[in-house]
Every structure is written in C-alpha cells, then in structure tokens.
Image (tube, rainbow, N blue to C red):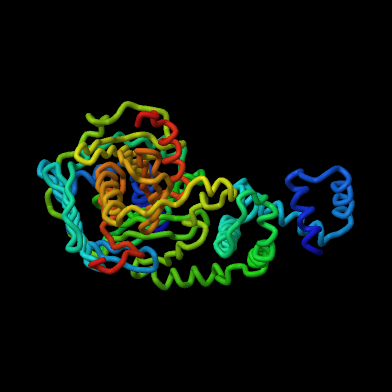
Amino acid sequence: MNDSIREQLSAMADGEIEAEGTRFLLKRLDHDPEFRGVWERYHLIRDCLRHQGSMAPVDFCAGVSALIDADSAAEARPAQRHVWRGFAGGAIAAGVAAMALFVLRPAVDPAELDTAQNGLSGTNVEQVAAMTTSDLVPPWRVAPVAERERFVLVQQPMPAELESYFLRHGEAAGGISLLGPLPSVQTVASAAAEPAQGE
Amino acid sequence: MYCWHRLIAMLAGLLAFVPVSAQDAGDWLRRLQQAQAQRSYEGVVIYVHDGRIDQIRVVSRAGIEAFQRFASLTGNQRELQRAGGEVRALSPSRPPMAWPAMAAALAPLDLEQIARLYNVQLTGTDRVAGFSARMLEAEPQDGLRYGQRLWIDQESGMLLGAALIGPRKQMLEQVMFAQLAFDGTIAPAAATAARADAPEASAPLLPGFVLVSARTDTSRGLEQRVYSDGLATVSVYIEHREGVPAGEFSTRRGAVQLYGRQLGGSRIVAVGAVPPESARRFVEVTAAGLKPAQ
C-alpha cells in the first residue's frame, strides 16, 4: 500500500474526500483485509491523538504520542499542516507501536509476581510497580497536536517552589486525612529525580 | 459427655470469633481516625517509591501540646516540624521555610460517602513492625482515585502502613512503619465535629471530592484549598504570579502528583496522591471558576 492511498484513507477519516473517492475506498475496504486493518489502526491512533475513549491501553496512546513528539522534534512542521497528513509520516512509527501493543505483551507472569511478593511478605515490603507506564503518564499530553500547541510547557518552577507545594500539602493532609502522618512522610522523602544536594 | 465438651468448645470458638467478625471495615476506619488524634508515638517509616526505599523518622505527640517531626534518614536531608501552630521545613541546601499550620481537627467521617466511592473490605491480617495488623482494602469505583490498602494496628487502631494501588491492581507505592513505639499516654478522644474553619460547602470539583479546609498565606499571596473524598486528599493552590508566561507544568513524588498551570497573573496547582488526569481536572475546574480579575 503506497503513501498516496494512506493519505486518501486519512482524508476519508476526516471526511475530507469527495464522494467518488469515498465510494472507491469503501469498496476496497469491503474486500481488502490489509486495507481494513490500516483503516482500523487509523481510528485507534486518531482516538489516541484526540484523547477520545478508545479500546487502546493508555500506555499505547502515550507511546503513540511520544513517537509523534519525537517525530515533530526531528522536523519542524508547517503551520497549517493537516493533522492526518502530519501524521502520515509517523505511520510507520505508529505501526511499530501497534506491533508493541499486540506482540510485546508484558513478559511478567502473574504467578511469578505472586511468588515474588510472597517471598517479601516477611518484610512487609511488597513489589512496587515501576511507575513509568500508564499510571503516571500524564494523559493530557495525548491530545490533538493543535490543542497541545495551545499550551507551551512553561519553565518548570524552581525546585524550592515545587517543594513548598508538596510540603504544604503533606502537612495539611496529615492533619485531615485518615492516613495521619503518612502524607507528610511522602513529601519529606527525597524526590526520585531530585538532583544531589547542592543543586 | 465427649459430645457435650466438644459442643462447648465449638461454641466458645464461635463466641471468640463474633467480636472480630462484627467489626466491619467502617468500624476500623472510625478507630483509625480516633487513634490518629489520640496516640503519641515515635518510629521509623519506610517509604517504597520510584524504585527506591526511603526511611523517615517520625515523632508525633497528641493532645494540647501537639507536636510532629519528620526527618528523612536517607537521601537529601529534610525535616518538617509542626508545633505551636507553625510548620517549619528545614534542609541544608535551601533556606528554611515556615508557614502557619493548617488547623488540625477531625472532620466527621462520612462512611456512606466512602462506601459510594470505594468498595471497602477487610482482607486479612498481617504483622507490621511487630504489631498485629488488620488489613483493609479500598477499591475505587471510578478512575478518579487510586485504591488503598491499609494496615491498622489491631490493639490501638493506629495506621501501621498504607499502599496505593493502581488501576491494574499494581502497587504504586507503599509506606510502612518498620519500627514503632507508643507513648503510654492517650489524649482525650477528639470530638468529630464540623471544623470551625471549614469553608462553606460547595459543589464538588470532582465527583466525591468535597472541600474540607482552606487557608491563605497572605505573605505569599497563596490560597490553599484542601479537598477530600474520605481517603484521598488533594490540595489546590491559587497563587498570584505576575510576569510568568502562560503554560503548564507537572512533576510527582512517588504517586503524589503535582500539576500546575499558569494563566495570566494566576498560577493554579493541584497536588495529591491521585491519578494525573484527576490532578489536571482539579486545575481545569478551578481555573474555569476563577474570576477574570484574579
């Protein structure tokens, strides 16, 4: 399938193709499984980009977004570039992400996790999942390109300012929540990504 | 005769079991809330997060002269002290910070509200720092909050540990006492009543989260609103900040998420152990409610 056909498919997804072309593509969709697969992937990816509800896991969407971001950083996009045509260049990357979605399932056997946790139960320290996946990937990054451009990431406030927000929250929550002192414990602990002392 | 003895033994066993089974999860949450305000203790807490384990020394005195001190024993030195209505944060690498403490008072525990938002159940027993613990799990009914697993001391009702559970049942972080010693004194039971400084009730920003407290630091032009759903707590800050370009920023510590947005002369920041999307929504809804003049 060449890029021209892909672009027509993309345009049809946005309702930007004339009736004759639509009829041709729909006819092909009826009898071409590969074509249908591409069509479905486009919808999946569009949902991710627009942050609409989709059947794709959030980390898949985040992966797509990250790939698009990388692609965008590599080459400056023309100002009025259509979102789908802008995406066509990233289709290969999205394809790789789709491969990852369907082929590279987590290689962790739940039974193994149970065993590992049982082994640690004596210390009351259970397996803590790495929080680099969907749980903590900010979903607001997965938004249409145009929408993302509305907000430029400002210069991150100074670490002391961020520290102040965390500490005040921990102190306030500690006096209010059922968890007592534990919110303060969380905020007093070192930040994982914090530079060494004397930053 | 043998059957009679056997029957008595069975009845005795059943009677011994009744008090335990009768204490449902709600009773344990009530005990937990009271114990936090009544017990004085000292110990070391381990905090498992982001692939590392931190240790924090905790000293807490309940009662009229309430005092709390948290000092990190690993990583960068930090200390948080709360006494006499003031909070001080100390770190060798930064100037000390101080601000008025949030008035600590027990808000009424709304178990019905918690039950609407979480499926709460007792899940078993465990031992933590040498204490027998009851385990309680709160599974959220929506994606706006994380699940929680709590370890509660069977004797005192004190919280011995807590873990945040992600949407795929994975543990996101865990806080647990590794060493704990109680002071013999028990402060008088704190009355659970509406807080004197509690703000007027308003429509929840996010489903289930109600405004439970608020304070303003006039020296910094910083307003802090604290929302709670009974288990999770989120602070929303509204700060006057001129001369800063519009935009957004985010970071986190463990599962405690921070999301902020600069809009004109105002900065709005949400902090809490909630999913990133929830923190963002807190900021968006707050921003939408701000008057243009702010």
Residue depicted at x 29% and y 59%: B132
Which quarter of the figure is the N terminus of chain A placed in?
A: bottom right
Q: How many numbered discs, if any?
A: 0
Residue depicted at x 39% and y 64%: B50
Q: Is residue A162 left or right of residue A9?
A: left
Please name whichever residue, B272 or A71, is drawn nearer the observer in this view of the structure: A71
Q: Is residue B98 left or right of residue A104?
A: left
| Residue B39 rendering spot, x and y as whole percentages | 18, 49
Does the rendering let one see residue A47? yes
Image quadrant where residue A118 sits:
bottom left
| Residue A57 rendering spot, x and y as whole percentages | 60, 56
Which quarter of the figure is the C terminus of chain A placed in?
A: bottom left
Note whether A45 is above or below B209 in the view shown: below
Please name whichever residue, B9 or B151, is drawn nearer the observer in this view of the structure: B151
Image quadrant where residue B192 sits:
top left
Does the rendering let one see residue B157? no
Q: Is residue B50 left or right of residue B129?
A: right
| Residue A150 rendering spot, x and y as whole percentages | 51, 45
Please name whichever residue, B43 or B95, is drawn nearer the observer in this view of the structure: B95
Note whether B27 is above or below A38 in the view shown: above
Q: Is residue B289 left or right of residue A14?
A: left
Image quadrant where residue B165 sits:
bottom left
| Residue B129 rendering spot, x and y as whole percentages | 26, 64
Please name whichever residue, B146 or B184, is drawn nearer the observer in this view of the structure: B146
